[in-house]
Image (cartoon, rainbow, N blue to C red):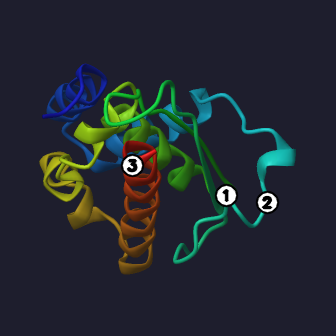
Amino acid sequence: MATEAFEEIAETFEFLDDWEDRYRHVIDMGKAMPPMDDALRVPATKVDGCASQVWIRPAIDGAGPDARFDFEGESDAMIVRGLIAVLHALYAGLPVREVLGVDAQAELRRLGLHDHLSAQRSNGVRAMIARIQDHAKAAAEA
């Protein structure tokens, strides 16, 4: 159920044998993301449960369960910014009803990320996924 953008990441990870190369790729993905406006880095967009500073702001196009989901994200840590880019590839452009059906943990396991992230980073990823799903659920019910 992954997006085409996420499938491209999975294919790239299959091609990259070394985890240092994979980390570098994730960091590069984060660097390529447009920066989030400083004015949007407020308590309402801050994600609790992350070791690093993380902000996620939804950008929903339309209304109800068929509205298209997107979000902006930012972090003060480069690897976390890259993880936000991975989550963006997983969810961006999906109808909000489909966002709720994505098994993000299973998709991320395909990349082997859980085996190579610290417990704190894994908790942070779970917190980001929960925030994304909360935004999608609220949009689907609107």
Amino acid type shown at disc 2: Val
Crowding near the residue tagged with mark 3, few <14, some 14–19, many ≥20 C-alpha atoms within 10 Å: few
Residue 2 percent location from the top left of the image: 18, 33
Left of 69 or right of it: where is 60?
right
Tell which tag, 3 or 2, sits nearer the viewer. 3
Q: CA distance from mark 3 to mark 1?
A: 20 Å
Mark 1 vs 2: CB contact within 8 A: yes
Residue 130 percent location from the top left of the image: 39, 64
Q: Nearer the viewer, residue 28 or 127?
A: 127
Task: Please name the residue shown 52% across and 55% down the image.
Answer: 80
Amino acid type shown at disc 3: Glu
Residue bearing mark 2: 42
Mark 3 vs 2: CB contact within 8 A: no
Residue bearing mark 3: 141
Residue 20 percent location from the top left of the image: 36, 48
What label sits on residue 45 in the rendered view? Answer: 1
- State whether residue 107 is above or below residue 50: above
> What is the quadrant of residue 98 in the picture?
top left
Amino acid type shown at disc 1: Thr
- Labels 3 and 2: the sequence-earlier one: 2
